[in-house]
Amino acid sequence: SVNPDLASERQTASFSVEKLTALLDGDAEQTRIRRAVVEAIESDPVFSRENQYFQTQNERYEAAVKKAVHLQKKMHEMGWTENGPEYKYIYRALSGDVAFLLHRVFMRSISVLGSDKQIAKWIPLATQHKLIGSYAQTELGHGTYLQGLETTAVFDTATQEFILNTPKISAMKWWPGDMGRSATHTVVFAQLYVHGKCYGIHPFIVQIRSLQDHSLCPGITAGDIGPKMNFEHIDNGYLLLKNVRIPRENMLSKFCEVRPDGSYVRQGSQKINYFTMTTVRISLISDEVLTPLMKACTIAIRYSVVRRQSKLKPGEQEAKILDYQTQQEKLLPQLAAAYAFHFINDYLQELFNRGYREIQRKNFDMLPELHALSSGFKAVITQHCTAGVEICLRACGGHGYSLLSGLPSLYTKILASCIYEGENTILLLQTARFLIKCFMAASAGQPVPPSVTYLAAVKHRKCPAKNKLDFLSPDIYTEAYQHVAVRLTSSTAAKLQDLIQSGVKKHDAWNQCTVQLVQAAKAHCHYIAVKNFAETVEKLETKAGIQKIMKHLCDLFALHGIFSNTGAFLHDGYTSAAQMDMVTASYLDLLAVIRKDAVPLVDAFDFTDKSLNSALGSYDGQVYQRLYEWAQKAPTNQMNPAYEKYLKPLLHNTLSKL
Amino acid sequence: SVNPDLASERQTASFSVEKLTALLDGDAEQTRIRRAVVEAIESDPVFSRENQYFQTQNERYEAAVKKAVHLQKKMHEMGWTENGPEYKYIYRALSGDVAFLLHRVFMRSISVLGSDKQIAKWIPLATQHKLIGSYAQTELGHGTYLQGLETTAVFDTATQEFILNTPKISAMKWWPGDMGRSATHTVVFAQLYVHGKCYGIHPFIVQIRSLQDHSLCPGITAGDIGPKMNFEHIDNGYLLLKNVRIPRENMLSKFCEVRPDGSYVRQGSQKINYFTMTTVRISLISDEVLTPLMKACTIAIRYSVVRRQSKLKPGEQEAKILDYQTQQEKLLPQLAAAYAFHFINDYLQELFNRGYREIQRKNFDMLPELHALSSGFKAVITQHCTAGVEICLRACGGHGYSLLSGLPSLYTKILASCIYEGENTILLLQTARFLIKCFMAASAGQPVPPSVTYLAAVKHRKCPAKNKLDFLSPDIYTEAYQHVAVRLTSSTAAKLQDLIQSGVKKHDAWNQCTVQLVQAAKAHCHYIAVKNFAETVEKLETKAGIQKIMKHLCDLFALHGIFSNTGAFLHDGYTSAAQMDMVTASYLDLLAVIRKDAVPLVDAFDFTDKSLNSALGSYDGQVYQRLYEWAQKAPTNQMNPAYEKYLKPLLHNTLSKL
């Protein structure tokens, strides 16, 4: 039975939840396929995550391996293939709680970086799991800056082998998933040396564990890097190489080859490889970043209509906490952001598909823009969604702090997305570099990529809004965002120029502008996200109430951004103080409007109770019952390890006397 | 041997680290006492936290009980007493990783709420640990709003007993520390009923476990609430009461008593009790909030001069990441905040001591101001420091994400401080209520408490700064903060008045202003923090370079606050856009200045390696070596639970063929 406080929220939905779900999935057929996958996965007890919050790192790892092995069987049984329509839903249905994800990266590396011969040898072995692969790039002392990697691979002409070494502790491979305990092979990135000359970073296939008994191969030291904030199920590992010899054929050689005589040959264009890196950044957004935020919103909003606290009106019963403006102001902007980023993800996917088609025609013109957008949005979306999940957690008070709410693990996992696949600050500076370059080009009248043509159109107009309703006009707010992005880019470009002209060295000048460059890059992405949301809403069909509620969310997303960054909009007087008061008024009004549809809006995300794995977020809203029943199953309720040893002796004196 | 990249940072300190440590401690004698306590605790292996990151919840709990029991012995051995000068350093030296903290709250409740007879009976029993106490207030469905608690205590005149019940699941006690597995007794807060009439919430001493064998008493259901984001060492518990009978004497009756005939008598003033609650909020700031931020700063800043990444100047070696402006902008404001909040903590402590003396003279005039300040600063400091610890964690990239960095556990623990002892939003609204009241009074020419007299002095001047150096003048920035606090308070008061005058009900009007009221309360606290820092700096002795570096930190704290909230200062034109550019310039200049002293400034916090318990933060900066050695000891490196069951069968086919 559904908690009546939750049930009542669903009776007044202003739109069709099922239609919105189909819109989010793409269409109703996708919804059907997704639900079938979810059903198949969740009805299989091997994939259960019910005990997850009670398990140790060893137990989580064991379960993840078990699931990975079972998944192979399941896919065969269900007729699912890696190229089938179901595939993208499988990982999501497992909530990523499965091993051998790096095995897939191992395979992709060989496909992209290997010669045809190497692909023919290794891919079938990997596909049949005759080995378990990993991907060893990051080192203890080296992350983003690949040129700094210190592992060496010296070519020995005499034996036709590469000799791999970890010359010092900071060169030890550190973090590769599946490598700490599972992998038999890995792709090691190392500085290539031939005849004493360094040719830079290259990839090498290295066997690290015996296929007979899984013992470490000669010269290999490897293990698990220990406990982390999340990802307990993954055996992130370390790897130390001491005179490890591998055959010449194990250097992945699609683009570069060392011939038997030691001569080094480059071949083909590596640009497609560069494109792969940007694709990874986009592909992680949906599963690793948006899904967690959508889950957190679902949990926090359902809880907020079930939880009652204090009286809003004297004499009445305690109020649903979602009826408090402050609670709305915490949660509803996160909900709006989840939708905004869902739509920007669609936009990016489309752009990348187009880019891929161009690249296949050997046209690499789109690459700089794609790189800038993928870097910027990876950073902005991971940052925004991580903060959003944290807000949802805190908004649930004490119960949000219990692992059983599901929120802590969503938070500790999504947080990592700010760091992996390019640390966010570094990525934003890459976007900024592109912006500055395009701004200079545009100022000089040269052509620039479509997403930045607006930089050329510097208008010094003032915001034309006359009352608070004007701020519900997408033209008004989109232009305000555009204005801020142009201002921040142009003023930072000017500062940079001034510094250089005043004699500061170029790299110092750049460093002195980086705080502001980061702001400019964020403003650029924020502008594009708002513009894209507004354009998406315009194209929606008007029936079933979908367009109307999406328009509200778009307005909220835009106005929340202004309300939270008033200085950026006030700075040069584009927006006046009086207009900012209108923004605030419209923004606060919107909270009350969207609050009415808050539960239907999270219902549309269509998460099952098992996928939420949360005592607070279940569809029926029976929060307290579930917390109580679940807690009773905790290992901490099975026995008391302190009683015999400490409590009994302590209380012993009391026994006869009290 | 100290990592040379770290050692070099210490050679150029502009001030005496030892003198600054003494200033933070109070004086050199306090430093000596603190170090002696730390030495005694850390040299005792029972108190070791070395394995903490590897332990399960059960293991953490067992260790915490063991430490609590051992601590009694240790205190006796060392001659430490609860009233001695060492006491405040003991908990800090243990990093709070010890059981029976609620036992102390149990004792304090009895001391404050109990009659002399009750104190005489229970305090000696508790002191000698003949029982283990807890404090059962929060319920599954009820937190901050105490009047909403649902547990009942019905007086039975016939037997002279109270009958305690949990009438429904939301009334179950939930969260009390030490109650899930250890406590034998607890103070239960319940609605008192006599002859069918409800007298509201009262405290009752209830025995929950047998002193003989620790089994649950009749009518008691209790256990552990399961896994949480941190506090694994504490057995936060649940408690369900079914017709539990306790003698009439077990209602704590300093202020209210039920006579044998069922008549209800109030006696004395409860105001002192109210004062206790505010004292708790202040007392947690130092150990639970400032210490974690100081530790996080120490870890992140030491790591940032050891870690090198990318090249700042072409041709040179990779740069220390602290040399990047963006890294400085992440970490140095947190360092400045740690100092700012240290000094505001001193201010609050002093104010509370004065308040306590007044209250003992039956003068309760200071109570509203003390309540407003303790609520506001509890919220602002916990919020700010939690965000600061998270920034430190992220600023360390992947290594910050390892539990071995110490940062994840600092974060997951400090996060709870935003929720417990009053949820932050609710506390800020209490401060706001006080501000609005005082603003109205001040506007009407009535006297108001000292901390809010500034609300009366509404000046509509503009900021007089003419160049960026002017923004290093405390008068300039303090007045800017004051202006913002007045503006936000007065404009929200006006909105509230307008709404009410336009016919909106008072409680609805209040709710519609809460987002802005929270802003006003934060601005008030921020202003006082800046003002207090500036005044503190002025009073410091000028020698040994201390005043100079503290002045820099004060400037940074103030300018960072403006830089991060430009809209608040620009809104009504108090600060112009040109002046805001000066703020930005001064702010960024300061980062480079303070960066030079960053390591000495964290060294002055004087944390031992054991207290940091971090592979990244140790005094010698041997980061990589320590990560590697520590990881090897992890349980994940002791055996592979997945090999025999899953990996071997999977790879089996390969064995003969590859």
Image (tube, coloured by chain):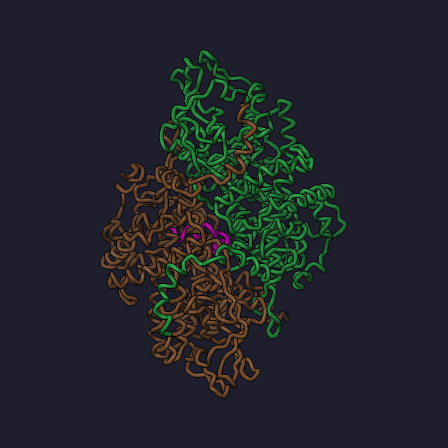
Chain colours: A brown, B green
**Closer to the camera in the image, B495 or A124:** A124
Quarter of the image with the N terminus of chain A is top left
Answer yes or no: is residue A573 visible. no
**Quarter occupied by residue B112:** top right
* Rendering coords of residue B510 (x, y %): 43, 35
Q: Viewer-proximal residue, B150 or A468? A: B150
Position of B499 relative to A147 (above/below): above
Q: Is residue B83 magenta?
A: no
Q: Residue at x 37, y 81 (%)?
A: A117
Residue visible at 53% across and 26% down?
A655
Does A357 sit above or below residue B348?
below
User: Does B285 sit above or below residue A170?
Assistant: above
The segment highlighted magenta reads A555-574
In this rendering, position of residue B44 left or right of residue B484: right
Q: Residue lying farthest bottom?
A: A261
Give the residue displayed 39% in from the left and 80% down from the top: A115
Residue A139 in percent (x, y) is at 52, 66
Q: Mainly helix, strand or loop, the magenta region? A: helix
Instruction: Tell me where residue A575 appears, x and y as whole percent.
Output: 46, 53
Q: Quadrant of residue B309?
A: bottom right
Task: Indicate the position of residue B609 as horizontal and vertical percent values.
Answer: 63, 52
Q: Is residue A523 left or right of residue A646?
A: left
